[in-house]
Image: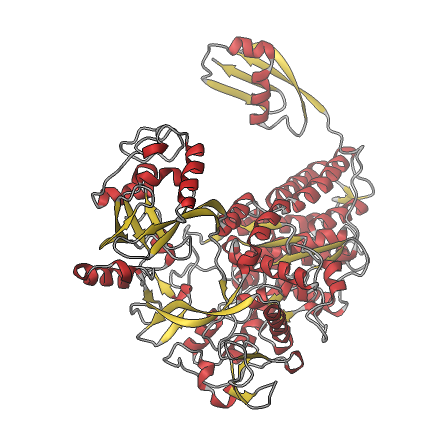
Amino acid sequence: MSKHYHPEEIEKKWQARWEKEKVYQTPKKGKKTYCLSMFPYPSGAGLHVGHVRIYTGTDVLARFFKAQGCRVLHPMGWDAFGLPAENDALRNKINPNKLVPKNIANFKRQMKMMGLAYDWEKEIDTSKPSFYHWTQWLFLKLYDLGLIYKKKVAINWCPSCQTGLANEEVLPGGVHERCGKAVTKKDLPQWLFKITTFADQLLEDLKGLDWPQGILQMQKNWIGKSQGVMIKFPIAGKKETIATFTTRPDTLFGVTFFCLAPEHPAVSLLVKPKYKKAVGNYQQKALRKTELERISKVKAKTGVFTGGYLLNPLSGKQIPVYVADYVVTSYGTGAVMGVPAHDQRDWDFAKKHQLEIVEVVLGGKVGKKAYSGEGKLINSAKFSNLASLKARKEILSSLGKKGLGKKAVQYHLRDWVFSRQRYWGEPIPLVYCDRCGDKNGVVPVPFGNLPVKLPYVEKYQPTGTGESPLAGLGDWVKTKCPKCGGPAKRETDTMPNWAGSCWYFLRFADPDNKKAPFSKEKAADWLPVDWYLGGAEHAVLHLLYSRFWIKAFKKMGLVDFNEPFKRLRNVGMVWAEDGRKMSKSLGNVVNPDEVVKKFGADTLRVYEMFMAPFGQPIAWNGEGVWGAYRFLGRVFRAYQEKGRIGEKTSPKLKSNLHRLIKKVGEDIVALKGNTAVAAMMEFLSLWKKEGPLSKEDAGIFAQILAPFAPHFSEELWCQVLGKKFSVHQQSWPKFDPQLIKEETVVIIIQVGGKVRGQLKAKSSQASERLQVETAAKKAENVARHLKGKKIKKVVFVPGRLINFVV
């Protein structure tokens, strides 16, 4: 056996042995622990090193909990439907049915290459009929519950390509990413989910989740619950009114303009002939922008005057109405009352358009910017001199008597548009029958007739009408009504790629069930997910949609828990070595295949965990990879060099080994792989100085290293130490509390070179300058001698002395 580390000689050997002996099969005993990475979309590009970071982090956790005796579920599958695969297939002129399986095979090869401890018997693929059968089943259950309805919705539309577009396909500036032509909006019938039904529950249930605070806040903001007042403003010269929502009715007398979203239906009621052309041009430009562009805080607030006016519902004052693209229909009513003195966005708009600014709330100096706080009212007729809170009540009462205002709760959350005019997605299991359909002409496909399979075609083209390419497949579209047996047509819209990802984590608990998507018993056994790891880009929609489905499932009696993911952790992005985002076009993508070929999978795993705390973004560093490789090489040699493994371990080395057991275990759970690997590196150096290690303790070190470097550790365990296969089926070593008690070190404290005190510290903390300095400054005698003096320099001798030069 070579004394040098050659990963290519050992990794495939152990991968084959693990697979043959089913080492990573889900255990049947122990405390349940469900460790899950967000499953990937299998692109043609294969895994990148960002994926490797997520999957290695979850793998380390899963291996650790299994070693702790837990019954760990650690599965993998494929989010295979959706827009990316469809566009990739169109570019390559191949049906996604042929392309996606190739991509999956490549991803799976790379994951096995990385030694990831997945139970492949649990594997799922959202594009397989055996999976989407149950996605369709769940759709029908939600339909029966009344949570799905049809409505005309404005979608992105490319007149040049004659096709509907997802938001991701519209580039900044409102052009189609493929043809570069201007995108407009087109009203098409869509299927929507009533996610708003659960708005309050979605908000309330965030309280018990162990998620990053930033993600929780993003969820709250997206739901966006506001309590306020709905006020109706009469249109001057007409009977109609326009409603707007506000949380500050006390500022009503400060309204000096009104803004409507470009797509607001009342624009046509207000616009005067003189302004029609300008308004029309503005609407067209606005509707080519994405919603994100329109609501951006950094963009200038543009708008055009309609020539129309509203009346203040209490003062009767005329208010000019503008169309402004920063107002969107996805929040509130798509109509905003402009109070420039007390809202900075309105202030900016008023200044740009030279509109009146009327101060109505005292409390801040209204000059160069708006005052958004509360105070006493002025310039507000009979409500002047009232405090804001009392004024809100009085003004609401007056509006109520006129029938022009009432209390209201508003949400940013809108019902979820679920249908897509795409080929590559789950067919929606509905048919249209003129004889026995409902108000939309719809008849649900019977559960026994599922799945409605996606038809295979060699080529397909956009229909030019905005309908799905499936609409052009006459033989598939024509069918029989399941109720009357007469002629019927299939629904040709497909589901979004969100459909499979809303519930896939449940299927992992029961992947072979042929009678239901999952049994309630197995869902109760494994769910909710204990550890959910993935990218922060899914902070809102994927998580929100999954939470919504779970709440609907609970209402149906399919599950008995409220939330799908108990604990969420986000991975930091891996940037290219040049500090930019990895991109094929920039030529800076790091392919894990190349790294593994040169250094081995365990080197890549160790480096990915060592580079930074799991949640911190970090740039790739080639030198760091070399460092991880050299570390493993030093460990490999240590296990074979004469005198490094003996009969007995010295007390100092034994004590440090037990501290290492404790630290690495704690760091794994805290997702601090960087400090865990650093501690192992420090121990290796100490081993060289203080050696030898007993054979038993050398085995413990191999076990500690095993979650990070599984092939490498298996080689040490079986081939070098001659222990029973496998290291990954051993219990995590226990540390002896008596052995990890730390010595106390006395540190002398000086001020200006004179001893002014001393500090007792644990040996592990005695070299931490910041901790020692902070504690030293608090010592009574030291603080007295530092008072009124400026510290010019701090001299620190770790574990011995600290001197404040003043």
Toward the viewer: 383 or 246? Answer: 383
Toward the viewer: 712 or 442? Answer: 442
Quadrant of the rendered image containing residue 469: bottom left
- 626 versus 586 height, above or below: above
User: Where does the image place residue 707, in percent across and percent down from the top left?
Assistant: 68, 53
User: Where does the image place residue 793, in percent across and percent down from the top left?
Assistant: 47, 19
Toward the viewer: 64 or 227? Answer: 227
User: Where does the image place residue 116, in percent across and percent down from the top left?
Assistant: 65, 61
- Quarter of the image with the N terminus is bottom right
Q: Residue at x 61, y 58 (%)?
A: 37
User: Where does the image place residue 268, in percent across and percent down from the top left?
Assistant: 28, 62
Q: Residue at x 39, y 76 (%)?
A: 466
Toward the viewer: 11 or 191? Answer: 191
Mark yes or no: residue 638 visible.
yes
- Residue at the extreme front of the image, as rendered: 401
Q: How is the image coloured?
A: secondary structure
Q: Residue at x 38, y 63 (%)?
A: 585
- Could you tell me how many numbered marks the image carries? 0
Q: Is 161 on the left or on the right of 494, as rendered?
A: left
- 313 versus 728 height, above or below: above
- 575 versus 135 height, above or below: above
- Residue at the extreme left of the image, as rendered: 274
Q: Residue at x 77, y 67 (%)?
A: 21
